[in-house]
Amino acid sequence: MGKRRSSRELALKFLYQSELNEGNVDEQMGSFMERNSSKDEIDVFMKELVEAVIKHKKEIDEIVQKFSDNWVLDRMTVIDRNILRIGTCELLFNFSTPPKVAINEAVDIAKKYGNEDSPEFINGILDKIYKEIGQKKGPLPFTG
């Protein structure tokens, strides 16, 4: 498994954990990294993703909701919702990840962690987001 894939999976695990547990995000991150720390470059990219998702969560959630036909964000599984947040973040903020790679990574992670419908669901939403926003605007500046 590639380093960036490992980072994305760690980011998913952290976002899942933090969504289910109240508390200070920095403290949660410290505890999480003690239990899950790996190579420096994996940890660095994971933290960048998590920080960007948290910083832009309101905007990301509004975008995901807009493109989630007949779905309410709160009714999605926690896994799908956070995979979509990570994928949308990589598509719309300057992460230097090619759009097709960001979408394919999200789909592959959905195959591993989601349910049987997750990959198609994730692909459909991220593809719409990219075609409607990402392709037209280009990456938005990321100020982590």
Image (spheres, rainbow, N blue to C red):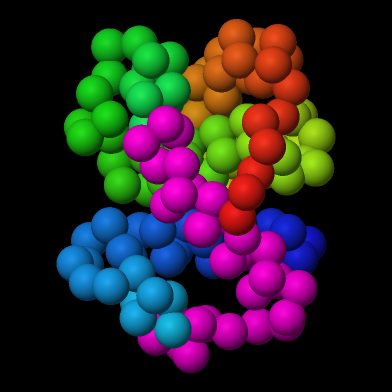
In the picture shown, does residue 11 fall above or below 104? Answer: below
In the image, taking residue 58 as reference, residue 95 lies left or right, namely right
Residue at the image point whose x is 54% and y is 50% from the top: 52
Residue at the image point whose x is 69% and y is 16% from the top: 137
Is residue 112 shown to the viewer in this render?
no
Residue at the extreme bottom: 34
Is residue 42 shown to the viewer in this render?
yes
- Choose between 120 and 19: the one closer to the eye: 19
Task: Determine if the magenta segment contains residue 140.
Answer: no
Task: Determine if the magenta segment contains residue 33.
Answer: yes
- Choose between 54 and 37: the one closer to the eye: 54
Look at the image and tell me in which quarter the N terminus lies: bottom right
In the image, taking residue 125 as reference, residue 101 lies left or right, namely right
In the image, taking residue 124 as reference, residue 90 lies left or right, namely right
Q: Quadrant of residue 27?
A: bottom left
Per the rendered image, the range of residues in magenta is 31-60
- Percent across and percent down for residue 10 are 54, 66
- Percent across and percent down for residue 65 are 35, 22
- Choose between 83 and 111: the one closer to the eye: 83
Look at the image and tell me in which quarter the C terminus lies: bottom right
Magenta stretch, main secondary structure, is helix
- Choose between 68 and 117: the one closer to the eye: 68
- Percent across and percent down for residue 108 are 62, 43
- Percent across and percent down for residue 40 are 73, 80
In the picture shown, does residue 140 fall above or below 54? Answer: above
Q: Quadrant of residue 127?
A: top right
In the picture shown, does residue 43 fall above or below 130? Answer: below
Residue at the image point whose x is 73% and y is 45% from the top: 95
Number of marks present in the image shown: 0
Residue at the image point whose x is 50% and y is 82% from the top: 33
